[in-house]
Amino acid sequence: MNTGPSDTAVRPSWRGPLALSDTRLTRLLLWCGVIGPLLFIVAFLLEGATRPNYSAWRDYVSDLSLSNQGWEQIANFLVCGLLCVAFAWGLRRALGSGKGATWGPLLLAVFGVSLVIAGIFVTDPNLGYPPGALLGGPQTVHGTIHGVNGLIAFGSVAAAAFVLARRFAGDARTRGWMVYSLISGALVVLGFIGSTVFSVLDERGILPNAPTGLIQRIGIIAGWGWVALLAYRLLRTASRPGAARS
């Protein structure tokens, strides 16, 4: 029997109950998934557009962690990472059971942790930034750790998109989200590979001033944006009239 909104059982429009023992807590955790990635994107876009001697076309987003303003991007990594870990917990509570209910949240938790580590271990100067840095400078331990976690971040968010695409495929009402998730995951992978290739070509002088930063930004906006929209979708579904049942 329908009794209106309930704090104990809210059902989203795609497969399986939104398993909530505490709806308010879960909604708060889902909001973390909206705020963290969007804040990350807005912050690095503003920093990249205003940072002296920095090229959003050429330089990696991680390079914003360098120079005397580097603390801004370091904080951006840490805040986004922690919020994404919180979102992963909320996503696990929200999905309940079914395809992707374990691996989706787990991969996004890995994604969040990798961002935190990338913030703690700052990248090495490269591609001439900060001014005076070599195109391909020496690799330090902390720079290597940062690079490995960059790979983990891109890989885990892409994998999460692919895993949850399988869940969306099980409901005719969410086939569009399946396609969107697959495209987002593919753009993340291509963004990582493409930016890496362009960076190497630039360092070797084969393609000076290559669009490394631009290509990486496409991958980041696709992946981080997918996380934010996924969280927002769950929030909208949970608050939709008639979505609750008792």
Image: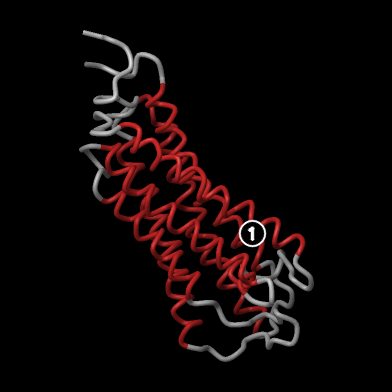
Circle 1: residue type: Phe
Q: Picture coordinates of residue 79 (x, y %)?
A: 50, 58
The image shows residue 78 at horizontal and vertical percentages of 49, 63
Up/down of 183 relative to 244, above or below = below
Task: Please tell me which residue is depicted at 68% across the width and 71% down the height of the picture.
Answer: 69
Which residue bears the numbered disc 1?
A: 44
Q: Is residue 188 left or right of residue 73?
A: left
Q: In this view, does 138 lie above or below 14?
A: below
**Residue at figure coordinates x 31%, y 48% from the top left:** 89
* Up-down relation of residue 185 to residue 76 (above or below): above
Query: Which quadrant is home to the C terminus?
Result: top left
Q: How crowded is mark 1: few (under 14 residues within 10 Å), some or many (20 or more)?
A: many
Q: Image quarter for residue 212?
A: bottom right
Residue visible at 60% across and 55% down? 218
Residue 67 position (above or below residue 42): below
Query: What colouring does the structure picture have?
Result: secondary structure
> From this viewpoint, which residue is outermost toward the bottom?
138
**Image position, residue 127 (x, y; %):** 67, 80
In the displayed structure, does residue 2 sit left or right of residue 206?
Answer: left
Q: Classify residue 98 as left or right of residue 113.
A: left
| Secondary element type, mark 1 | helix
Numbered circles on residues, count: 1
Image coordinates of residue 153 in percent, x first then y, are 43, 63
Quarter of the rendering containing residue 243: top left
Q: In which quarter of the image is the N terminus?
A: top left
